[in-house]
Image (spheres, grey):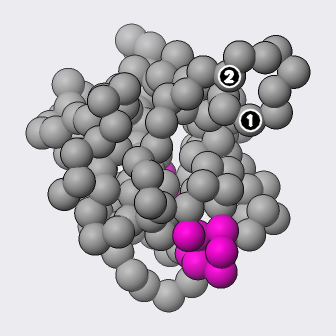
Amino acid sequence: MTPPHPHVPTQHGPTQHGMEPAPDPGGGEPGERRAHGRGPHDLLVRLPGLPSQVSRVRRLVTAALGRDHPLYDDCVLLASELATNAILHSRSGAGGWFTVAVHASGAAVRVWVADAGSDEPPCVCRTGSRTATSGRGLPLLEALSDRWGLSRSGGATTVWFELAHAAGWS
């Protein structure tokens, strides 16, 4: 595995919420399916690397969580940022595919996006201008998520994030 960019944290091992690290991206047929052996809020989808698919990612997170979920807004925002990054900054956007997974448990929500890879690892680059239209995805991920990380393997990049539920929510 290629070492991650030094400014991007990589997490390994079980999380504080008992969820396993982000799974490696798998093949599979295009389209939506529930992850085998997982809960009712699990979703695994392979999508073409087209800009139109970002809105589909938002709809998929909505389907997995529901609009009344307390982490809904942040999950939708961060998942759409990761999908956008996969399309704009990897080979997924050049005729490839990317995969999105959502896992919701009583303790947390984890989302991961696996793309077709790029020559360089993702970078938490700070945009210098308030009017810049890009460069905010990973800084948002860093600011809003409880945990996040990435892995690069076999030419693909997987970026994941985790948001913890407030105490008492189920």
Residue 130 visible somewhere in the drawing:
yes
Q: From this viewpoint, is residue 31 visible?
A: no
Q: Magenta segment range?
A: 91-103
Q: Nearer the viewer, residue 79 or 6?
A: 6
The residue depicted at 82 percent of the width and 33 percent of the height is: 133
Q: Secondary structure at mark 1?
A: loop
Q: Is residue 53 left or right of residue 165?
A: right
Residue 5: in magenta span:
no
Three-letter amino acid code at disc 1? Ser
Crowd around label 2: few <14 · some 14–19 · many ≥20 (10 Å)? few
Q: Residue at x 22, y 45 (%)?
A: 3
Residue located at (47% from left, 61% from top):
118
- Judge from the rendering whether residue 153 lies leftward or rightward of residue 41; answer left or right: left
Residue at 66% of width from left, 28% of height from top? Answer: 136
What residue occupies the far bottom of the structure in this picture? 29
Sequence-first disc among 2 and 1: 2
Q: Are marks 2 and 1 in contact (CB under 8 Å)?
A: yes
- Taking depth in this image into account, of 31 and 8 the one nearest to the observer is 8
